[in-house]
Amino acid sequence: MKFQIDKSDFLEGLQQVQHVVSTRTTLPILSNVLIEAEGDYLKLSTTDLDVGISGRVKANIEKEGATTLPARRLFSIIKELPSTDISIEIDSDDVATVRSGPSFFKILGLNKEEFPPLASFEEAREFGIDQKLLKDALKKTAYAISTDETRYVLNGINCLLKEGSLTLVATDGRRLAMVEQDLEFPSDDETGVIIPTKAVNELQRLLQDEGEVRVRLSSSQVGFELNESVLVSKLIEGNYPNFRQVIPGDANHRVTIEREVLLNATKRVALLASEKSNSVKLTFENDTLKISANSPEIGEAEETLHIKYDGPTITIAFNPEFLMAPLRALDQDEVFIDLIDDMSPGVIKIDEPFLYVIMPMRVTG
Amino acid sequence: MHPDARFDAKAPIEEKALTLIWRQSCNELKESIGDMAFDRWFVPLSLVRVTGEEVIISVPNSIYSLWVETNYKADLNRVLGTYLKNFGPMKFEVTGQGGEEDVAAVKNAVGETVWEQPIEEIPTHAPADLKAEIDKSKRKQKKNAADKPVRPDDKSPQRRHECPDLERLRRLGASAGLNEAHLFENFVVSGTSRIAVAASEAVTTEPGKTYQPLFIHSGSGLGKTHLLHAIGWRTLLLRPKSKVVFLSAETFANEYVTALQANALTKFRNKYRKVDLLLIDDVQFLGNKGGMQEEFFHTFNSLNDSHKQIVMTSDMPPHEIRKLESRLVTRFQWGLTSEIAPPDEAARVAILRRKRDEWELKVSNEVIDFIASRIHHNVRLLEGALIRCSMVEKVSENGIQISELENVIADLQTVTDCPRLNPEEIQEVVAEEYGLAARELHGRRRTARIAEARHVAMLFSRELTDYSLVEIGEAFCRDHGTVIHGINSLRGKMEKSTSIRGTVEKLRRTLTRGGSERSGGSEALLR
């Protein structure tokens, strides 16, 4: 196998797949990238057995073939090469010779037969989603995914395709983010799957603002095909908890706030949130919102925002991180905060189908 | 609340007490987390079990365990801590129906069952020398439960390693999950348990034929589990080749879930469908568990079809088990359903004396009579009281005063033995709280204050005593309809008014833990 390739094309291709490369050393082949030269393209694939990804880049193929090379190492070498023209030749023992201008590298690879094949989706259901829509929905929910491995069903985004809409939900038990989008798909394809965090992260990297992503679903795997790339992931098995139970009933009070103003004020006040309670207090009263925090041994902070509010005084404490996360992920100018009382969860909404439930912290004493 | 009045989680706690603790805790929780959150997350929850190792709270599905655990666990711990001490970490147990997929998985799994070959016939007679061998080696622990034609004492005791059969029996018993302390031999048969014991013995002589299944039910602490173990030992002794398995329904459920997760259902099924004698404790645990009932149904049928014996215990008769599928109810009733009623006083005395001898305690008959007269409904509590009294007797220098014992076992009698309350007592306590005379509660006057107090007293008479509505009515010089109406209207008011609710809960605390204070009068008499 022999090919010439442009440095930046090659780097881009490697960049796209190298995040998946396993850091576990138990199976050396998993730290390698599978390189397949065929036609006018070089196909690059990596996997950690849970998630697999492959993309292709244009190359000038002199002799077709395939091998695997250590992905991270290859990436660093290519990055440092002085010339833009790279020529690579691989011999029958999977030893790669890299030439570029004055540079010469020899890299030991592993046979392609050892590389675990990506799952195929022969009997899978297939449908298309607008890339931007999916990208947007993932961004608005992914930050709420739980990292608690004892509750593995929560270590991913719950995707429901039902009754003409796509619902994405993530929760860690203290907050919950949900996006609901209208989506056309065959009604007998109604389904719910949990896509693991790692796949969500990779997918977010791949998604762009235009075009469509083809989704393939089998009972235990999901595949995404977009922009010359394919992402395949195992699904999380198990039942996602009935998240609708978490969503509070009708709110008593709605406050409209400028998103960035709230975000920045919270960010500043949070600097003085005590490590122990890690909370900021929001006081809604007479057309003002006071955000305050104090740590006994450091000091205190307070920001006053002018809002429209004529309800009773409500004082509610939140974890500042949990309050800021959705504000960062959204791009609307205004957000709505729906409140019931001091002890009920708050809900952040926008004028699009998005909802974020945040549990209040009860500051003792 | 005085710390000593708290229940010790390391000692067994009656179900009734758990219910009370939970009810009280709920009221407090409501205060601290707000009605809205309470209604949403706590109404369907219940306190299932409290031990030194764990506190089990049942939740209908996984969102409850997630949300309550992450957001309200600290509150729960705090509130429970006012009623309990020494309790273990809190766990949430999903008892409701699983999601649709769960059920589907179970159905799928059931479809692929591999039916086992019929097992070879159980030998109807164990080798004669086994019994003899074991009888000979019988020592303190009294391991064998055999009907003994020969007195063991006429031969000199032999060393254990010379009794391979005993060792073998022990090994078999241990692997079946049997407890050596529970034998027919040390089960005190009283009038109320005679039928259950006879049925149990019959099961060991003719397994799978006479009573298939045998279903024993009784309140807690009356010896259901003891009988189950005893059946296991006797069967192993008579038929050493038979495969006996003892487990609680909960273990069954847990193993099932584990197997489901590990994709090892076939192994799980083989384990339970291949046994000759299946002893299942606390089968009421299956109530409300759809998928589990399906699995148990098939296990049951499989064993039944191959003429194996199943013995089950529960704290209530099959038809009263909540949310138990009717096909299981009827199957449970196929064979014999037998109840162990609480022992009468004579039996209680017999049990206590027996335990005294077995544990080699120095407790006088007088004390035993006293305990038997005070603690009625639960053998486990009797044992607890016996041990406490013996401790007191040991440390007190000039002999034990019966009157002192009243305090020693007070907490065992109070909530757990609520039936000691009667409407008259309740009337007195309630009247005092309202600043009235007790007789005003059964008088004709109906001012708001008197009526409210009357209704409160009716409510407690209903909740904390075993008296029927008619009897309660009589105590208030009313008919039972008036009692029902009174209680209902009070409950309505309690919903609306926190002050009434507060008064009621305060009184409830006084009534349920006030055993020692209230019996102050009788104590004086005893002196």
Image (tube, grey):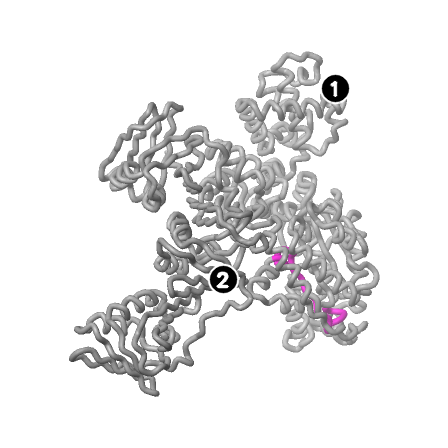
Which residue is depicted at the point 80% across and 56% down?
Answer: B199
Which tag is nearer the camera, tag 2 or tag 1?
Answer: 2
Amino acid carrying label 2: it is Arg
Amino acid carrying label 1: it is Cys
Which chain contains the residue that carries disc 1?
B
B355 to B152, vertically: above or below: above
Taking the image as drawn, is residue A107 in sight? Answer: yes
Q: Residue B74, image x and y in percent?
A: 44, 42
Q: Is residue B412 magenta?
A: no
Which residue is depicted at the point 67% across and 34% down?
Answer: B420
Q: Which residues are magenta?
A: B236-253
Q: Residue A135, image x and y in percent?
A: 39, 52
Disc sitting over residue A342 in the figure: none
CA–CA distance between discs 2 and 1?
75 Å
B76 to B94, vertically: above or below: above
| Residue, disc 1 | B477
| Residue, disc 2 | A216
Q: Residue B234, image x and y in percent?
A: 74, 65
- Nearest the camera: A365 or B468? A365
Seen as rendered, the residue at the extreme right is B210
